[in-house]
Image (cartoon, rainbow, N blue to C red):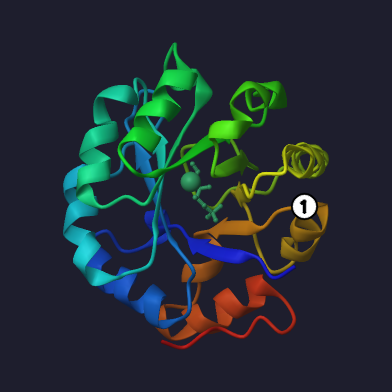
Amino acid sequence: MTPLISPSILSADFAALGEAVRDLDAAGADMIHVDVMDGHFVPNMTIGPGVVSALRPHSELPFDVHLMVAPADPFLEAFAEAGADIITVHPEAGPHLHRTLQTIRGLGKNAGIALNPATPLSFAEPVLDMLDLILVMSVNPGFGGQAFLDGQLARIARLREMIEGSGRDIVLEVDGGVTPDNAARIVKAGASALVAGTAVFRGGASAYADNIAALRGSGGRARAR
Ligand code: DX5
Ligand code: ZN
């Protein structure tokens, strides 16, 4: 299967995010992964809905917004208004995951949950019928440039079985430490989308298309736009 590639702008030059989004679009990215961090749920802070809104006009690609914030509920409407297409939350970010997902879908957005390396996969089971995406964290969230946690491969395979069993078209996305060296194994385990920051931004804008193609694997030439 050829995976969707969702470059994370966490690795971009934060002084030129609009240019980065335009360059990623031109280089053939399938989505733009926006890592939102609050310095509370994760030990880092990044951007908020105002930046997402500023970036929206720079690409028509889906904005794949990963909320590493707690609580997430107070910010769902703002990110939906700002132009998020997919809003992904961590189950630990609030007391009522079902209601949070109901709210995201009620805002007309695709809903995702992100599972940290130690979060039980069973968190996904009761809400599978509400999910458009499951994000497997293959690093502990907060920073780019970390090493892929190989132990997540078995969890990716288990989630693929759960998704097949649900009969739903749920994107299984993997985030953290994804490189051309491990991408094929991650896809073979069952991933249908890959988030990458370091591996895409390496070498600068002239390298984005080749870096994205390398993650897609053989035959995955970048779609120049
Ligand atoms: C962690 C972030 C990173 C980022 C990808 O909280 O979510 O995983 O998206 O970073 P790289 O590809 O540099 O590991
Ligand atoms: Zn992320």
Amino acid of disc 1 = Gly
Q: Count the marks: how many?
A: 1
* Vertical position of residue 190 compared to residue 222: above or below: above
- Residue 54: % across, % down: 16, 58
Any part of residue 42 in sight: no
* Vertical position of residue 175 compared to residue 213: above or below: above
- Residue 206: % across, % down: 43, 86
Residue at the (55%, 65%) spot, across then down = 5
Question: Along the line of sight, which residue is nearer the eye, 42 or 192?
Answer: 192
- Residue 225: % across, % down: 41, 87
Considering the numbered disc 1 on the image, is that residue within a helix, a strand or a loop?
Answer: loop
Residue at the (36%, 63%) spot, across then down = 12
Residue at the (24%, 35%) spot, across then down = 77
Label 1 environment density (alpha carbons within 10 Å; few <14, some 14–19, many ≥20): many
Can you tell which quarter of the image residue 17 is in? bottom left
Check disc 1 and report the residue beneath it.
Answer: 190
User: Dividing the image into 4 quarters, which one contains the N terminus?
Assistant: bottom right
79 to the left or right of 163: left
- Residue 87: % across, % down: 40, 42
Question: Along the line of sight, which residue is nearer the eye, 82 or 12?
Answer: 82
127 to the left or right of 8: right
Question: Along the line of sight, which residue is nearer the eye, 170 or 35?
Answer: 170
Residue at the (66%, 80%) spot, across then down = 220
* Vertical position of residue 109 compared to residue 206: above or below: above
* Vertical position of residue 208 compared to residue 130: above or below: below
Q: Residue furthest front?
A: 167
Any part of residue 78 in sight: yes
Can you tell which quarter of the image residue 44 is in? top left
Question: Is label 1 within 8 A of ligand 2 (CB to nearest ligand atom)?
Answer: no
